[in-house]
Image: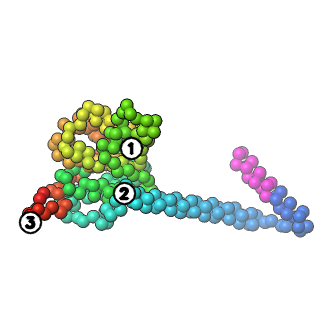
Amino acid sequence: MAGKGYKGGLHNGFATLVKAIEELSHQKFDIQDDEKVDIRTLRQKEAIEASREIAKEREHKHKELIAQMHKQGRVNAKFTFNTIKTDPANMEAIKVAKSFCSTLIVGQQYDVNPSLLLIQGEPGTGKTVLCNCVANEFLEKFFKEVEIVSYYEIKRSRTPSPSDTNYDISDKKSKWDRAATVDLLIVDGFCQNNETLTVFDRQIFSELLRIRYENNLPFVISTTLPPSSIHAKIGDDCFEAIKGYNVFFATLIGMSRRQPIMVGGANLR
């Protein structure tokens, strides 16, 4: 009944418009049904065109966001899956990282746990490069936002200080909220010096893991910690929180890829 009422109202409104035009022009118009259909078709086409323009504007704004992130150095534009140099030492890790990226869209369509990519390797083996490859892939394909941070930045946002001003408190809260809610969070260099997390560290990081899990948000962590020591170094709370995710583990094999420092004709490593 509601549909008929709406249709009748639309017809009456159209008829009123035609009558007004006839009175003003002193002409009689014979509006046929096929002409009315043409008007409906025209409106449908206008709606489609409007949606296309909205999509174009959205794409334009997202490209501007990506360019800004690259310019600010928040994500390195040089490192993508198309430009990364592949060799036997990193081939498998790159494959795992690509698989992680491919699950991100699936996670939005089905009721599955959020994905977490854990990148492990010695200093200089390419963890940061791989993190940036994932970030650029996410930015280009999913039209969403990404943040690459160190754990120390996150810790600072949760560490109160007697000298904090109102601005400091607001800034710390903003950074924590950003880490907890950004579409993809990448924590690069977690336990960079193979240190054991303190009780305070474990509270912070396990809380972050839980919040992102509850909101079905993906996570990337890079670390130098050997696989066999991860549980002991980060503690039960963090380890159990990680296990709740759909975990991808990528290991970068070998030693540093960076050029050695030359001292007296010899390589200093």
Q: Which residues are magenta?
A: 1-14
What is the CA distance from the residue labelled 3 to the residue labelled 2?
34 Å
Compared across the picture, whether 64 is left or right of 163 comes to right
Q: Percent position (x, y) of residue 98? A: 30, 57
- Give the total of numbered labels: 3
Describe the element under mark 3 as helix, strand or loop: loop
Q: Main secondary structure of the magenta part?
A: helix
Compared across the picture, whether 27 is left or right of 260 comes to right
Q: Nearer the viewer, residue 187 or 249?
A: 187
Q: Nearer the viewer, mark 1 or mark 3?
A: 3
Q: Which mark is residue 179?
A: 1
Amino acid type for the residue under numbered disc 1: Ala
Vertical comparison of 198 with 15: above or below: above
Amino acid type for the residue under numbered disc 2: Gly
Describe the element under mark 2 as helix, strand or loop: loop
Residue at the (36%, 36%) spot, across then down: 158
Amino acid type for the residue under numbered disc 3: Gly
Q: Which mark is residue 197?
A: none
What is the CA distance from the residue labelled 1 to the residue labelled 3?
45 Å
The residue that mark 2 highlights is 73
Describe the element under mark 1 as helix, strand or loop: helix
Residue at the (8%, 66%) spot, across then down: 265
Compared across the picture, whether 99 is left or right of 178 comes to left
